[in-house]
Every structure is written in C-alpha cells, then in structure tokens.
Amino acid sequence: MKRICKNITAVAILITLLLGLLTGCGDTSTKDSNQTATPKEVEQSDKAKNDVKPADQATGNKDTVTVALTDEPDYLSTCDTDSLMGAQMNLLTYNCLTRIDMETLQPVLDLASEYSQDSDTEWTFKLKQGVKFHNGEELKAEDVKASIAYAQGFDRTATYTSSISEVEVIDDYTVKLITTNPNPNLLYDLAYHFNGILPASLIKDKNDFSANPIGTGPYKLVSWNKGNTLEFEANVDYFDQDRMPKIKHLVFSIIPEGTTRTMALESGDVDMVYSVSSSDIDRLKGDDDITVENIVSVENFFLFLNAVNGDFTDSNLRLAVAYGINRDDIIAGALNGYGTPSYSCVSMGYAESVDTNAYSYDPEKAAEYLKIWGGDPSTVKLSIICSNDTKTSIATIIQADLAKLGIDVEIQPTDSATYQAAMATDTLSAAIVSWSPANAATYVTRFHSDRHGNTPASVSSPEMDSLVEQLRVEMDEAKRVELIHSIIALANGDCWFVPIYQVNYFRAHSKDLQNVVCSATGYVDFSTMYWD
C-alpha cells in the first residue's frame, strides 16, 4: 500500500510555500470542500491526493491504535494551551472553518463549504449543512460567532484572533467576518486550534472544554486518566466522509522515557511511537516489522530567555549565549546526529527564510559580547526548565558550553503541565521551546508584544511591533517578503531568543499500520490511517 507520510525535503517545503505566497488576493470564491483555500481558486482533491482506503474495505481486523507519547497534553480545550500535544489532541475533537493540509502546509476548507473574499476586510463563509457536534446539536452560524468571541477572550490567542473585528450572522449557514485591517493571513489564522468551533450553547453554559471537549471532530473523548492514558472513539457521525476515521479506538499512553517507548513498540504493547528517541532510531530501522517515518520539519528549537526580568533583558548577554553554544555538539550528543543546527530566530525552509545577522559557534565573539554587557558572568543564574529527556540532554550540553563563559546553568526537569504554567509567567529564567507554524508570516507575528499574553517574558520593542503590524495588513506579496526579511534581521540582531536546531521528526509504527500522514509542523493525522 502507498504510504502518505513522505520525507518532506526543504526544497519541497520552499516550493509549496512559495506557490502559496505568490497567489493573489483579489475578490475570490471557492466552492468545493476539497479545494485549497488560498486567495485564488485552486482545485485540490484531498480524497485523490491521500489515496485513502474506504473504511469498509480495510482488510485488518484490529480496531484500535495505541500510541506512546512523550508528553501529556496539559489541556484538551482549544484556548487554554498552545502546546503541540494539546493542539494535536484538538485535531481529534474539534474542527475550524479551515484546516492546514498536513502535506502542503496550505489552508484548505474544513467546516466551511465555500468562501469569498468580498474586499480586503470582508470575508463570507458558507458552512457545510448537517454537521453535528458530539452532543448532537447541529452546527450553525451562531456557533461560529460565539466561538470566535470565546477565543478572543483569551490573551494568548491575539495573534490568531485580534484582526477580526466583527462576525455577522447572515443566515443559519452563512457568516461574514470583518477584519479591522486587511489580513492576508486570515485563512491560516482560522485554521489554528484557537479558532476551533464550539457549540454556542455550551459556551453560554461555561462548559469545561478540557474535561468535556465537545466539538465536531473525527473522534470523541472517552476517558482521560491523567498521567497515564487518553482514550478516544471514532465519531460515526463525522461530517467529512472522505476523512471518516478508519480506526475505531485511539489510546494514547504517556511514556516519558525514550527506550521504554521503543521497547513497548517492539513488544507490541503499543502500535506507534509519536516521538522516537534519537538513540533508538537505527535500532528500529533495523526491525522488519516496524516502519520509521523521517519528516524534515520547520520546527525550530531554541533557548527562551527571560527578557523582562533579570540579566537577560540586555541583548548583549543574550548574544553572548547565542555565540557561546556549540550546536554541532548538541546534534551529536543529544540527538545522535539527527537534526540540523539552527542559527537564526526564524526557521530555514520557508520561502522567505534568510540568515541575516544569524549566529555561529564563536567563543571569542561570545567573550566580546560579555565585555560589552559589562557584568560579572559568575553572578548570572540561568535555570533551564525541560519538559522531556531530550530537552534535558540538550540543556546539559548548554550547561557545559556556558560554564566556559563563566555562566552557571541549573537544569530543571519538569512535567509538561508545570512547564506550560511556567511559560505563562514573567518570572521563569529560561526554557527550551519550539515553534512550528505553517508559514513564515505566522511565525514572525509571534514577535509582536501582544505575544505577552501567552509568554509574558518575551522580548518586545516598538520597532518590531511596527514591522509586524505592517506585515499583518500588507496585501502586496513582494512587500510582505521585504517586511519578513526586516523582521528576521531585527530578531537576530537583538537575539530575541537563542536558536539551537531544527528537528527531523521520527515517528515509528507497526508496518501494518497504513496511510500514516505526518506534517512538517509536528502533527499526525489519525483520521487517515488504517490497519492493513
């Protein structure tokens, strides 16, 4: 059988994203739910592209997939978290007006059946009819209006919701979104999990969407035994027949230790390892009963430093750290050679990626920046929180590198929930963090100061805010690219954070599990897989 989870090369990513960026932004409409929802009408059949075997033709008799996870989601609701694993769970239970195609990284229609861009600031969306929430209620336009208003009530969602000034209900199945200014990134924004559509009635009743995640998604939550397992069952009333889940039951087992996950896969206790420990990749590749997927990502791992409180408010100290870390040692020692050193605050692999003001490993330059900073390195107390064993291994190498500069590093292993809670404060010292949005524009808008609603300790500056605000409303593609380049140069020049590496995702699973679709942004599409 053909597997859809292909090795995505950097060239392919560049081509697909560039094509998306070169598409015009005039008055447009799309009418097929499988069309690519880019600003010009482009036909795209998900069914043909994914080569999905219909559920009633699946040859296997297993109806469950058990997946080993490194980290547990801290929430199952749409807006209470921005962690990758939380967003992955959201893909099971919720839908948005649009979604990001996991192969092309382009927005396609989801709950919307068609849309038109009526002007630079007006977008009309027609909803698919007969879509049911998990509680049996039918999706209506009022649910869209209530859900966007709900998301806007969370500070952390500003990057994806703040441009929408009004949602007008035209009829039960039609909504008009009016933006404060032109927003060429709106179709991407609407696909983000923050904009998952929820029942208006449950929003009004203040439903706990983490404990009771009611959406329209392909799976329903059965149980969450925190610290141990999450169980989901297929939504037999799912609206998208082309993407109807083939697996009846999904079980996610929390196994933080890498080799333990590997042994569970080898023994058949689990069917899939979401994140393979780098030390076990070659071992699993040699097992004929296991398939190891290698996906080149746009996910950039970096050392996040508190730029609001403490010594690292000074960019010279941040730059000293950036030049003082040997990324090749990290790739070799913590990742067993599986990764690409990152020297820029914005991932390479986007069409607009440039390395202006990027870093290198240069201890002499690091010493120069320490001298400009003018403080005593021995007084710097850098505590790095790490939410899994890979991050702890990375932090250990950083600790050794920065000791050569006289900076003392403390490593704090912690669980995912504690990690996410610390990131929501302005008091943490440092953390190893990653970003993997679908396009460069979404990535760089996170440098705006409104990001403080999610990460209060982030760097901010009026100059950066101005550049991002211009980008958010600029409809001319050439000018947008220029703005993105200026943003990258500024972020690198002031060292908004310390880039470490771009990851290759290694997902391992039983060879009999077919059509495992993976994304360069970190997600897996559990709706498409089936047993052979």
Image: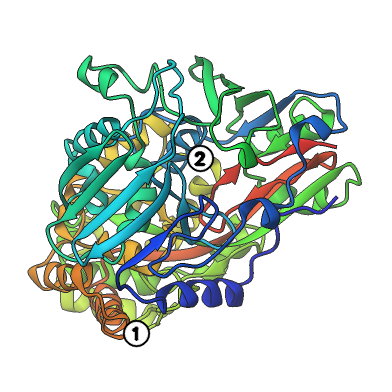
Q: Which residue is disc 1 drawn over?
A: 356
Q: Residue at x 79, y 30 (%)?
A: 56
Q: Secondary structure at mark 1?
A: loop
- Horizontal arrangement in the rendering, residue 267 relative to residue 22 (left or right): right
Q: How is the image coloured?
A: rainbow
How crowded pointer 1 is (Cα within 10 Å; few <14, some 14-19, many 20+) is rated as some
Q: Nearer the viewer, residue 507 or 339?
A: 507
How crowded pointer 2 is (Cα within 10 Å; few <14, some 14-19, many 20+) is rated as some
Q: Is residue 124 above or below residue 464?
A: above
Q: Nearer the viewer, residue 22 or 268?
A: 22
Q: Secondary structure at mark 2?
A: loop
Q: Which residue is disc 2 drawn over?
A: 388
Q: Where is residue 331 drawn, in percent x and y?
A: 58, 64
- Horizontal arrangement in the rendering, residue 190 relative to residue 317 (left or right): right
Q: Residue at x 75, y 38 (%)?
A: 54
Q: Is residue 58 above or below residue 494?
A: above
Q: Where is residue 466 drawn, in percent x and y?
A: 11, 71
Please state which of the two labelled residues, at mark 2 or mark 1, is closer to the viewer: 1
Q: Where is residue 324 drawn, in percent x and y?
A: 38, 71
Q: Residue at x 68, y 38 (%)?
A: 273
Figure quadrant of residue 369: bottom left
**What is the residue that sits farthest to the front in this orientation?**
171
Q: Residue at x 30, y 69 (%)?
A: 27
On residue 308, the disc is none
**What is the residue that sits farthest to the left in this orientation?**
462
Q: Where is residue 521 drawn, in percent x and y?
A: 51, 55
Name the residue type under label 2: Asn
